């Protein structure tokens, strides 16, 4: 089957093709477009999300609790679906907190991380009874004040900026000076302050980085995080009840990348769980994942509205672009722009023609969906599909840029 992707991208076999048309959630793409009533849109396949979580459950030891990092995709319907699959949800704002609470997830299993929590957000977190991952000394008295007014002890963990980083990580969030978390060397003093203020200490959150496809790098970071947590626990005002080892699991976006192997990571977590039973008895070990759970289950779909030639090169101009899918345009952290895997969703069985460039309607040369890719000859009205779009898509893009219409989202 020729899906129109370059051969160097890993095949997007998670989605079936029937009669030359991509299927999402068992439905043809054109039917989904008609059901949604517009393009562009994001479509997320709930069966693929369920299967990914089940795959992880089979691979990981029973002692590891799985949390969904909602910042990857906060669509309410998706979060509600995820709440029935995972053990907890991690949020990064009061807005996300409300979605998590509405999903039915127990407040006992919701945590809140972020380097700039407003006093009002901290108050809402304490009132909801969730765990706050403290990232600054400034947060502690605000949490204590909120707890005193509400008559409850605020639940807190310390987010630690470790002295190490997640090697080969797409986004490094630990090691060296960082806005995230509290430097490990400052943690002992703050543990004492937590005890003095009467806060309910529960543990540590150590997140070194994300989007990593190297199992050995993830294993190294997990081992380092565990050793650091045991060291810091000696000065804690209460036993450690939860240790969030972060995540870091990546998905393949670009040519030459392959999927992350889980076997060695699972064996490493089994070893950590055995050690924790002795070193930190009663501690819940948490793995916090976002992109890995939802990224490959989503596609971004836009419609060709013009086909034009410019000095010998074909451009497919669509109604979607960087204002909806900033990451696919290459403007969300890429140093050198590379294409996400793309296809013409309603021409999946057609042979690729000469290279073309897929662009959006925005008046900027940055609005590129795919550059110089071999796709079947596409006509006005055809549907361009961008794979690997289930995470950091709609919510991570500048939707108001140039005042074009918003995109839709659907859980199929």
Image: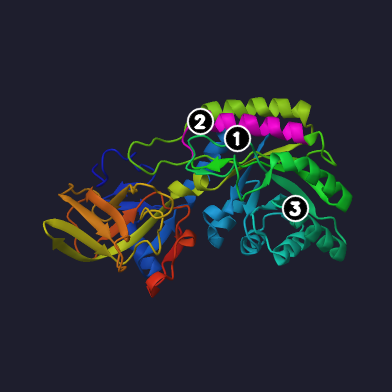
Residue 164, numbered label: 1
- Considering the whole magenta stretch, tell me its main secondary structure: helix
Residue 62 colored in magenta in the image: no
Q: In whole angstroms, how far apart are the C-alphas of marks 2 and 3?
A: 34 Å
Residue 176 visible in rendering: yes
Residue stretch rendered in magenta on the structure: 212-232
Q: Residue at x 67, y 58 (%)?
A: 104
**In this rendering, position of residue 39 left or right of residue 374:** right
Q: Are marks 2 and 1 in contact (CB under 8 Å)?
A: no
Above or below, 54 relative to 100 = above
Q: Position of residue 223 (x, y in %)?
A: 63, 29
Which residue does the numbered mark 2 point to in the structure image? 215
Q: Secondary structure at mark 3?
A: loop
Alpha carbon of mark 3 to alpha carbon of mark 1: how far? 21 Å
Q: CA distance from mark 2 to mark 1?
A: 16 Å
Please state which of residues 315 and 114 is positioned toward the viewer in this rendering. 114
Q: Where in the figure is residue 206, as x and y percent of width and height?
A: 65, 41
Identify the residue position indicated by label 3 in the image.
137
Give the residue displayed 86% in from the left and 47% down from the top: 195
Task: Identify which residue is drawn at 45% across, 63% down.
Answer: 409
* Dot in front, 2 or 3: 3
Looking at the image, the residue that sits furthest to the front is: 177
Q: Quadrant of residue 207?
A: top right
Q: Are marks 2 and 3 in contact (CB under 8 Å)?
A: no
């Amino acid at each position: 089957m020729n899906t129109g992707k370059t051969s160097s991208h890993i095949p997007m076999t998670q989605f079936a093709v029937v009669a030359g048309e991509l299927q999402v959630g068992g439905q043809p793409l054109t039917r989904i477009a008609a059901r949604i009533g517009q393009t562009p849109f994001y479509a997320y396949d709930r069966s693929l999300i369920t299967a990914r979580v089940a795959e992880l459950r089979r691979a990981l030891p029973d002692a590891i609790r799985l949390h969904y990092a909602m910042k990857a995709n906060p669509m309410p319907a998706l979060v509600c679906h995820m709440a029935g699959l995972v053990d907890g949800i991690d949020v990064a704002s009061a807005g996300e907190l409300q979605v998590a609470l509405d999903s039915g997830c127990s407040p006992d299993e919701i945590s809140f991380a972020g380097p700039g929590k407003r006093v009002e957000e901290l108050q809402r977190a304490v009132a909801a009874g969730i765990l706050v991952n403290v990232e600054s000394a400034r947060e502690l008295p605000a949490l204590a004040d909120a707890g005193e007014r509400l008559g409850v002890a605020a639940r807190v963990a310390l987010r630690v900026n470790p002295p190490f980083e997640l090697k080969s990580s797409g986004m490094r969030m630990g090691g060296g000076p960082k806005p995230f978390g509290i430097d490990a060397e400052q943690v002992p003093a703050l543990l004492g302050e937590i005890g003095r203020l009467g806060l309910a200490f529960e543990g540590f959150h150590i997140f070194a980085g994300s989007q990593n496809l190297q199992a050995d790098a993830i294993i190294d970071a997990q081992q380092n995080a565990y050793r650091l947590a045991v060291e810091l626990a000696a000065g804690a005002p209460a036993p450690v009840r939860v240790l969030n080892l972060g995540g870091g699991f990546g998905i393949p976006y670009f040519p030459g990348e392959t999927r992350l192997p889980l076997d060695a990571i699972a064996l490493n977590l089994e070893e950590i769980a055995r050690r924790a039973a002795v070193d930190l008895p009663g501690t819940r070990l948490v793995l916090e994942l976002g992109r890995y759970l939802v990224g490959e289950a989503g596609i971004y779909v836009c419609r060709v509205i013009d086909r034009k030639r410019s000095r010998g090169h074909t451009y497919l101009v669509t109604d979607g672009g960087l204002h909806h899918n900033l990451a696919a345009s290459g403007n969300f952290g890429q140093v050198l722009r590379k294409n996400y895997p793309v296809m013409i969703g309603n021409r999946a069985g057609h042979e690729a023609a000469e290279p073309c460039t897929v662009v959006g309607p925005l008046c900027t040369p940055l609005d590129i969906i795919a550059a110089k890719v071999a796709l079947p000859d596409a006509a006005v009205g055809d549907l361009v599909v961008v794979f690997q779009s289930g995470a950091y898509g709609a919510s991570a893009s500048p939707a108001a840029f140039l005042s074009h219409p918003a995109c839709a989202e659907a859980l199929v």
